[in-house]
C-alpha cells in the first residue's frame, strides 16, 4: 500500500488500516470519520442533513426509532390509516419518488 496522507482524516484512516484487518472495524472507523453518505443523493460520503440526531452518538436511540417505524409500517404499510395521514403526507413530500428505491432490494 502506498499513500501520501495530506489531511488528519486521511492519516487516521491509514492508522486504522495498519491497526486492524477486520473489515467491520474498518467500516465503523470510516463511518465515524466520513459519515454515512447521502442515500437519496449523489454524494458518496459526508453527513446527511440530520439536525436532531448524531448517527454515531445517538445510535441506540436511532435503533429504537427504527424499530418503532418498522412496527408502524408493519401495521399500516401504506400509512393509509387516518391517524397516519399527516405522516404519509410529510414522507411523500420529503422523499417522493426516492421511496421506489425500497422496491429494488
Image: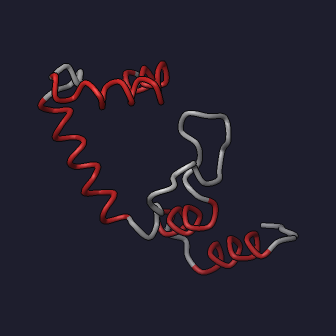
Q: Is residue 36 above or below residue 38?
A: below
Residue 1 percent location from the top left of the image: 77, 67
Question: In this image, 9 relative to 51: left or right?
Answer: right
The quarter of the picture where residue 57 lies is bottom left
Residue 3 in the image: above or below residue 64: below
Where residue 8 appears, x then y in whole percent? 77, 76
- Left or right relative to 105: residue 10: right
Of the pair 69 and 4, the residue shown nearer to us: 69
User: Which residue corresponds to the image point at 59% horizontal and 48% vertical from the top-left?
Assistant: 37
Q: Where is residue 54 in the image (x, y as percent from the top left)?
A: 48, 63
Residue at point 68%, 79% (across, down) = 15
State which quadrant residue 32 falls in.
Answer: bottom right
**Residue lying at 47% horizontally and 30% vertically, measured from the top left:** 94
Q: Which of 94 and 31 lies nearest the eye of the viewer?
A: 94
Number of numbered labels in the structure image: 0
Q: Is residue 15 above or below residue 53?
A: below
- Side of 70 relative to 12 (left or right): left
Residue 81: image location, x then y, percent: 15, 22
- Foreground pick, 51 / 100: 51
Furthest residue in direction left, as rendered: 75
Amino acid at each position: 500500500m502506498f499513500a501520501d496522507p495530506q489531511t488528519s482524516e486521511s492519516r487516521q484512516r491509514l492508522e486504522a488500516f495498519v491497526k486492524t484487518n477486520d473489515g467491520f472495524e474498518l467500516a465503523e472507523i470510516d463511518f465515524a470519520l466520513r459519515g454515512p453518505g447521502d442515500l437519496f443523493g449523489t454524494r458518496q460520503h459526508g453527513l446527511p442533513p440530520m439536525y436532531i440526531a448524531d448517527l454515531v452518538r445517538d445510535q441506540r436511540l436511532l435503533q429504537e426509532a427504527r424499530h418503532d417505524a418498522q412496527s408502524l409500517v408493519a401495521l399500516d404499510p401504506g400509512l393509509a390509516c387516518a391517524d397516519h395521514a399527516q405522516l404519509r403526507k410529510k414522507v411523500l413530500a420529503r422523499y417522493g419518488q426516492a421511496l421506489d428505491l425500497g422496491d429494488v432490494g
